[in-house]
Amino acid sequence: DTAVSQTPKYLVTQMGNDKSIKCEQNLGHDTMYWYKQDSKKFLKIMFSYNNKELIINETVPNRFSPKSPDKAHLNLHINSLELGDSAVYFCASSQELAGEDQYFGPGTRLLVL
Amino acid sequence: GESVGLHLPTLSVQEGDNSIINCAYSNSASDYFIWYKQESGKGPQFIIDIRSNMDKRQGQRVTVLLNKTVKHLSLQIAATQPGDSAVYFCAESRGYNKLIFGAGTRLAVHP
């Protein structure tokens, strides 16, 4: 069984479009995250949610809006996509808010043309 | 396949040798550290962690060493196998489980 799943795995779209990436975890964790991995493999946190409440927002452009309908899901909506948004986006989850390792999903490869 | 990560530092080892991957962290207030392994096309996978009240922790074939004086973390892999080939990241935690990742090191294991 997949612990943290993301859809879609690949996303190719035109500049200016709006797209969403979905994430679900079946681990019963309270905290979920979104990370961006750039072309140099650098991983940077974007957002974290704990029990549907936003905890971390790392000065991400407001074109990015996370939404957590329940604690098992954290979706990422991106408006007006730009070329620089091309990256791999990873969802992750952890049991508690601090001091715990995070379980990562398989990633969504976004390419903006 | 992916064409990313071409500029990552690479550690090349022979199968069966021991590998040591090093990482410098930035914040002396960080109190929790993790090593992750990322295989091509996959998400990072937890390997081992260590808290700041320890200086060494061992797992199966892996050992993490923490030197808080110089803010240095290392991952030792014993008897490296081809399946260990991946990119390895250290991460430090600074409250609210905010993980700050290092730049990554590519481990290439040759038969």
Image (spheres, coloured by chain):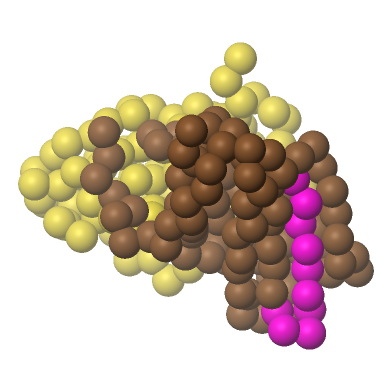
Residue A69 left/right relative to A80? right
Colour brown belongs to chain = B
Q: Nearer the viewer, residue A69 or B12?
A: B12
The magenta stretch spans which residues? Answer: B62-71
Q: Nearer the viewer, residue B59 or A7?
A: B59
Q: Position of residue B30 (x, y in %)?
A: 73, 73
Rendered hue of chain A is yellow
Asked whether B100 falls inside the magenta stretch, the response is: no
Give the quarter of the image for residue A41. bottom left
Give the quarter of the image for residue A28. top right
**Residue B58 sits above or below residue A42 on the image:** above
Residue B13 left/right relative to B31? left
Residue visible at 69% across and 63% down?
B74
* Number of marks in the rendered image: 0
Can residue A20 be spotted in the picture? yes
Residue visible at 40% across and 37% down?
B40
Q: Nearer the viewer, residue B111 or B44?
A: B111
Quadrant position of the N terminus of chain B in the picture:
top left
Q: Main secondary structure of the magenta part?
A: strand
Q: Position of residue B88 (x, y in %)?
A: 54, 51
**Residue B16 sits above or below residue A45 on the image:** above
